[in-house]
Amino acid sequence: VNRKKWRVVHALARTGCPTEIAKLAIYLYPEQITQRDEAGNLPLHIACSSHSTGSFAEGNGLSNSSSLSHHRNYSNRTIVNNNKSACLEKKQAQSSPMMKCLLDVYPQATTLPNSSQKFPITLALCAGKYWHTGVRDIFQSNPLMFLSGLSKDTETNLYSFMIAAAAAADLASSANLSSGPKVSSSTSEEMRMAQRIASKKIGSMWRFLPYISKRRALKEARAELEMMKLTTIFELLRIAPEACLLQNGK
């Protein structure tokens, strides 16, 4: 009988564990960072594809200003953020601590596909991660992979910005945006962000809020999510703008 081997790092990669726990697990079991599980996944593959690693799942809506100040220059396309974009970043969510730790200690994993031939960047985008919630960290870990076009999905032949745009279109079509925000038809991601916004601005428990306040929070949440989606597409496209000139991914 084939039994799955339980691995601490792989298990924590599915969760939104704090940074201290992530660093401790990697320190105690460094060999697991490069090990694949029975499904052929590295810990980074699991962290990128897991929905529960998002900061909203753990309520960490606000990003750390110290982590935002850490930027890496890449090629001649260094992105210089102005004051307006810097203020926007501070309002955005941050990536999973576990995923960030895995990228720091083993950035080479960004070039390794899983058993389905999916790169970590593709897994992250398909899981609904945005530029400020993990995609930027993947890029900064290995800029050359993006600049050289190696991040293109082998199955669909799509570049990262195309995958991000397709994912955003799917999410938009699943929500009835034309009729306005409705509490009953909102996605789980919209609900999590709306609850965070309501808690921050109103300071009241979600279930005790009047319906009009919930709709107002959902409207703001959808606008913020839409901006995060557009930012992801824009930043990925700015990395390799020449991809727009290519036809059929060739």
Image: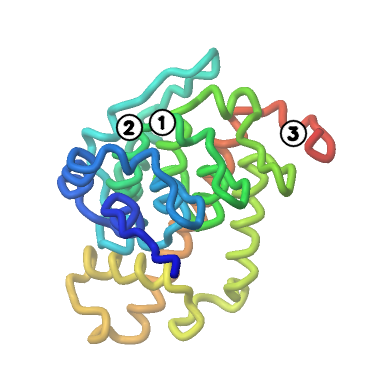
Which tag is nearer the camera, tag 3 or tag 1?
Answer: 1
Q: Position of residue 95 (x, y in %)?
A: 35, 47
Quadrant for the C terminus, please: top right
User: Of the residues shown, which amino acid type is indicated by label 2?
Assistant: Asp
Number of other residues with Cα within 10 Å of mark 2, as a class: few under 14, some 14 to 19, many 20 or more: some
User: Of the residues shown, which amino acid type is indicated by label 1?
Assistant: Pro
**Image point (27%, 70%), residue name:** 198
User: Of the residues shown, which amino acid type is indicated by label 3?
Assistant: Cys
Q: Position of residue 160 (x, y in %)?
A: 61, 41
Relative vertical location of residue 23 with respect to residue 250 in this rendering, above or below: below
- Residue closer to the observer: 236 or 97: 97
For the residues labelled 3 and 1, say whether their Cβ atoms are less than 8 Å apart: no
Q: Nearer the N terminus, badge 2 or badge 3? A: 2
| For residue 172, side relative to residue 33 (left or right) | right
Residue bearing mark 3: 244
| For residue 161, side relative to residue 85 (left or right) | right
Quadrant for the N terminus, please: bottom left
> Which coloring applies here?
rainbow
Q: Position of residue 142 (x, y in %)?
A: 47, 27
Q: Residue furthest right?
A: 247
Using the image, tell me which numbered label, if any, was put on residue 107.
1
- Residue closer to the observer: 127 or 118: 118
Q: Secondary structure at mark 1?
A: helix
Number of other residues with Cα within 10 Å of mark 3, as a class: few under 14, some 14 to 19, many 20 or more: few
Q: Position of residue 205 (x, y in %)?
A: 20, 79
Separation of marks 2 and 3 at Cα, in angstroms = 31 Å
For the residues labelled 2 and 1, say whether their Cβ atoms are less than 8 Å apart: yes
Residue bearing mark 2: 104
Which tag is nearer the camera, tag 2 or tag 3?
Answer: 2
Q: Secondary structure at mark 2?
A: helix
Relative vertical location of residue 212 with respect to residue 245 in this rendering, above or below: below
**Image point (35%, 78%), residue name:** 214
